[in-house]
Image (spheres, helix red, strand yellow):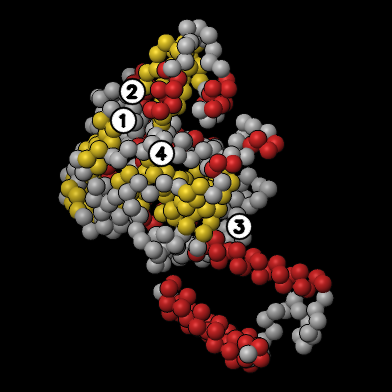
Amino acid sequence: MKEFLKNKWFKFSLAAIIYLLMMIWIGNFWLVLGLPILFDVYISKKVHWAFWKKRGVKKQGFIVEWIDALIFAVVAATLIRMFFIEAYTIPTSSMEKSMLVGDYLFVSKMAYGPKVPNTPLSFPFAHHTMPGTKSTKSYSELIQWPYHRLAGFGDVERDDVVVFNFPAGDTIWVGNENPDYHSIIRGYGQQFKADDMSKGRLLQSDHAYQNMARKFMKQRYDIRSRPVDKRENYIKRCVGLPGDTLISKDGQLFVNGKAQAAIEDMQYKYIVKTNGTTINPRILDDLNIALADRGRRSASEYELPLSNAKAEELKKLNNVISVTRVLYPLGMYEEVFPFSRDYNWNRDNFGPLVLPKEGASVTLSKKTLPLYERAITAYEGNKLEVKEDGIYINGKLAETYTFKMNYYWMMGDNRHMSADSRYWGYVPEDHIVGKASFVWLSLDKDKSFLSKIRWNRIFKGIE
């Protein structure tokens, strides 16, 4: 049996079967051209593929053995990370208390099917920047592959916790990536418009002011673009699927007319008033409120992110007078998607909004355009122009548009402290990375030594 397993024809057959199955899974039949290489590696051995080894020598040196092991480890880990599972860290409080800052988790790429990399030429284990540098790209765009997703276990489902590439991260101001570039452009555009208003100049369109802002930024700063797979990874809860109708009323989200299923640890911002004395820091520690989130309005007022249960606990304290949830009222305009005064939306009150779905068509007008413009241009690669006689897509007058992809709506469980779809819109299907599976380690940055480890969260599943 041992001799059979060592037989070169058996090794070649096994490798060829695995290779062919991978080829079918990937769906690229040009990979069949790699079979002659496998044949040569195992059978004919005409080419010395392992050039770092001495040919014909059975006992290799110590250094060669280490190189062998290193190459195998890098290749294996890269394939696992690319197609199966990847580690991820929670860097911000946007998903608290479902997940905490300092949670280390595994993301399953098989859940929805792994994406074939858009930029396959990349430094191992680096995302978009070379380790030890602040701006050196870790990838080359010499080879760029179109979006293609391999078969997985299923589709994105409502309330899944999803990791995805940041949609607004297609353009960046190097070294200043928060807030995102598009938010900065809108901000500068408003400043230029306000300046014209104050000086009595003829006002231009918002698009014109934003174009001025882009030129202003490009002349002064390092502005770059990133391919989809090299944009920042974000993690949020998928609350809306393609074709869903969403509306939020006083912070309560409704999907297709039904209230969103309760999420136990969902948080909102609360104003906590005391009798003038401070709340014991140990109590705030027990509530898992990070030091960075303990806002103070005055000596007697705190601004804290709390779940309903935590808010009730604070109400029981002798020195607490009131605990009031912050509410952004209906009709109050906030700079949220779709960034138009025609929609007086804010983080607590927005919609109705119908999510784009592959094959679905929408009517285009100057009022509806803010809802769909970025999907039509940035995500689906069309040229769009607004003229006096209508909207033109790729040079043709268009009254409707049919979407090529599915789109999702992502929101953080920390509803008042989350940069999510409310602030940059839909997440296209080609940006979906995978499903958060479980926490394998959790560290509290406000603690020290072994007390940093949140033992109760290790190997905890994510719901």
> SS class of the residue under badge 3?
loop
Of the numbered discs 2 and 4, the one sitting upstream in the chain is 2
Which residue is most to the right?
61
Q: Nearer the viewer, residue 42 or 443?
A: 443
> SS class of the residue under badge 1?
loop
Mark 2 and 3 residues: CB-CB less than 8 Å, in contact? no
Q: Nearer the viewer, residue 106 or 120?
A: 106
Residue 412: assigned label:
4
Hey, what amino acid is under mark 2?
Leu
Residue under label 1: 251
Residue found 52% across the figure and 30% down from its top: 288
Residue found 64% across the figure and 32% down from its top: 447
On the image, the x and y values in percent for residue 358 come to 26, 57
Residue found 76% across the figure and 79% down from its top: 53
Locate residue 340 relative to residue 140 in the image: left or right: left
On the image, the x and y values in percent for residue 15 come to 55, 82
Mark 3 and 4 residues: CB-CB less than 8 Å, in contact? no
Hey, what amino acid is under mark 1?
Gly
Q: Residues within 10 Å of mark 4 (few under 14, many from 20)?
A: many
Q: Quadrant of residue 194?
A: top left
Question: From mark 2 to mark 4, how far is it between C-alphas?
Answer: 17 Å
Question: From mark 1 to mark 3, how far is it between C-alphas?
Answer: 39 Å
Which residue is most to the top?
276
Residue 216 in view (yes/no): no
Residue under label 3: 125
Q: Nearer the viewer, residue 288 or 255?
A: 288
Task: Look at discs 3 and 4 and give the one toward the viewer.
Answer: 4
On the image, the x and y values in percent for residue 58 come to 78, 85
Image vertical order of residue 82 relative to residue 384, above or below: below
Residue under label 2: 327
Hey, what amino acid is under mark 3?
Phe
> SS class of the residue under badge 2?
loop
